Image (spheres, rainbow, N blue to C red):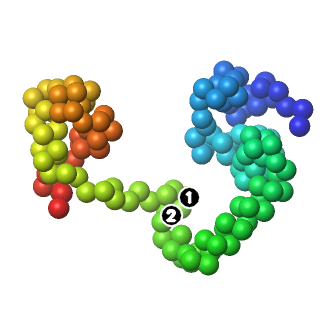
Amino acid sequence: MGLTQEGLGHAISRTYAAKIENAVSSPTLDKFTELAAALNLSPVALLSLVIATRDNVPTSTVLTEAADQLKAIEAKISPSDIAAQLTGKEIVKRPAARPADPVKLQQVLESKNAGLTKAETARQLGLSRSTVGFLWDRSPTTEN
């Protein structure tokens, strides 16, 4: 394509491009779409190129596999079901699928009210930081 990091300057900074190239950072979907546009590609084409390069296979193989997977999904899920999960171009955030453990929730909230940080709470209760983060802003009145 003959583009340099400088040539993508209107889409991303040279520093950020280098971080992406070196796998130090990953672009958001919006940034990935901007990069694709800067390269005059669709996001699907760019992602196909990335995956094909990573897996050392032709892009046609990547796209054929994706097309087959999409056909299988379309056989199970209707376009209206997919559209129901979207508002405009944004994905509708659904509530967490996993219920909160009421005992752990109470312990986390007590630690929070006592002024402990998430990290301190995780250490004190012997919970993972992700579990503490999941419970941190929940309310016992909204849990079933």
Residue 37 appears in the picture as rendered? no
Q: Give the x, y percent position of residue 35.
A: 71, 40
Q: 49 or 94, which is in the foreground?
A: 49
Please provide percent x and percent y for residue 83: 53, 70
Q: Is residue 105 left or right of residue 16?
A: left
> Residue 119: image x %, image y %?
26, 27
Q: Which residue is mark 2?
A: 86
Q: Which picture quadrant has residue 108?
A: top left
Instruction: Name the residue rendered at 85%, 50% in the picture.
Output: 58
Q: Quadrant of the N terminus?
A: top right
What is the three-letter code of the residue carrying label 1? Lys
Q: Position of residue 26 (x, y in %)?
A: 60, 35
Q: Given contact means CB atoms under 8 Å apart, are the residues at marks 2 and 1 in contact?
A: yes
Residue receiving disc 1: 89
Q: Which residue is depicted at the point 75% across and 50% down?
A: 48
Asked which secondary structure carries label 2, the reply is strand
Q: Amino acid at mark 2?
A: Leu
Residue 17, above or below 92: above
Specify the farthest residue to the top.
Answer: 15
Would you say 116 lies left or right of 67 here?
left
Q: In whole angstroms, how far apart are the C-alphas of marks 2 and 1?
A: 6 Å
Residue 75, by quadrant, is bottom right
Residue toward you, 136 or 12: 136
Q: How many marks?
A: 2
Disc 1 is placed on an element classified as loop
- Left or right placement of residue 128 versus residue 23 in this view: left
Q: Is residue 91 visible?
A: yes
Q: Vertically, is 116 above or below 38?
A: above
Q: Residue at x 55, y 75 (%)?
A: 77
Q: Callout 1: 10 Å neighbours few (<14), some, many (20+)?
A: few
Look at 18% across and 57% down and name the residue there. 143
